[in-house]
Image: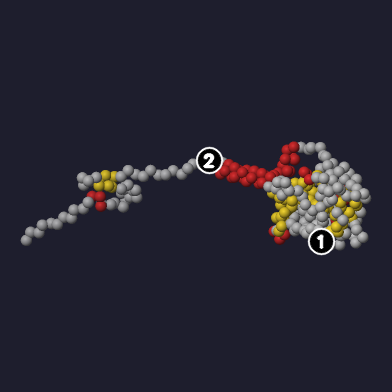
Amino acid sequence: MDTEAQHTERDPSSDTDPSGPEEGSRSARVPDGSGREEPAEPEEPVADEERGPGSSWRRTALVGGACVTFLLLLSHFVIQPFLIPSGSMEPTLQVGDRILVNKLAYRFGNEPARGDVVVFDGTGSFVEEQPRGNPVTGLLHDGAAALGLAEPDETDFVKRVVGTGGDRVVCCDKDGRLTVNGVPVEERYVMLGDRPSSVPFDIVVPPDRLWVMGDHRSQSSDSRDHLGSAGGGMVPVDRVVGRADWIAWPFGRWSTVPGTDAFAAVPAPPAGGHGAGAHG
């Protein structure tokens, strides 16, 4: 009995030779409706954006420059860091403290008050006018000082306001206390063991001027030391940079600068000024 041979018909496309040229091909065959399969267009590889070797450095420099510019503007108009180089304000401020000075504190009609710790430019009151040096070096130093990376200029000082315009400040009364407008002041912020002053004085502060003293009285060169110089040791209000409000560094001393109520009972100076006996 004859037997008809059975043939299995296979789609030629199913014959795959592992070693053939189509191995690993990413092409696809798409039917076109007529029974034939047409190869699809191969996908175009997406090329990575070419970057120049210096583009990342330029971007970093731009970001860094923008940050420095922002900090300089902030320190010029709003808050400026200062490094405390001496112990004249101990125990309130320690050597190496970095304080933040609020430059807006006296910008809108407010003026320094008794008890405020202020930073001021002592040119003309504490130090004489100095000839200008190299402008480039000065600019670099000012920028570093504005960021708290260098000591402030030698003309910048930090002290506590003890008397404002019209006040009569005297030291000392029979109990060894400083008085302002005839009222004794309990200065609890003064360094333990220091007297209010070893130098006696009796002065009336002129209008728009300040009488300032350090908290570490025995280690502070302040208004007392300039009584005989031009200005009599009084600091012009318009030379005040700002009020020291915060201790920013080191972290262990991170806090606000302590305030004081020592002058709460001190009255305003008399409208007609102080009588005989007071002098500037």
**Among numbered discs 1 and 2, the one appearing first in the sequence:** 2
For the point 31% across and 52% down, which residue is it?
18
Q: Which mark is residue 188?
A: 1
In the picture as drawn, the residue positioned furthest to the left comes out as: 1
**Is 42 placed left or right of 162 in the picture?**
left
User: Against 24, is 192 above or below?
Assistant: below
Comparing 208 with 24, the one in front is: 208
User: Against 175, is 126 above or below?
Assistant: above
Query: Secondary structure under badge 1?
Result: loop
Comparing 24 with 82, the one in front is: 82
Measured Cα–Cα span from mark 1 to mark 2? 64 Å
Q: Which mark is residue 20?
A: none
Where is residue 49 shown, x and y percent of the image? 47, 43
For the point 72% across and 54% down, which residue is it?
245
For the point 58% across and 42% down, which residue is it?
58
In the image, what residue type sits under mark 2? Gly
Where is residue 25 shown, x and y percent of the image? 33, 48
Comparing 167 with 198, the one in front is: 167
User: Against 248, is 146 above or below?
Assistant: above
In the rendered image, which residue does mark 2 sit on? 52
Where is residue 75 shown, x and y percent of the image? 69, 46
Residue 88 visible to an observer of this rendering: no
Residue 34 visible to an observer of this rendering: yes
**Is 13 placed left or right of 178 in the picture?**
left
In the picture as drawn, the residue positioned furthest to the front comes out as: 272
Query: Secondary structure under badge 2?
Result: loop
Where is residue 61 shown, x and y percent of the image? 60, 43
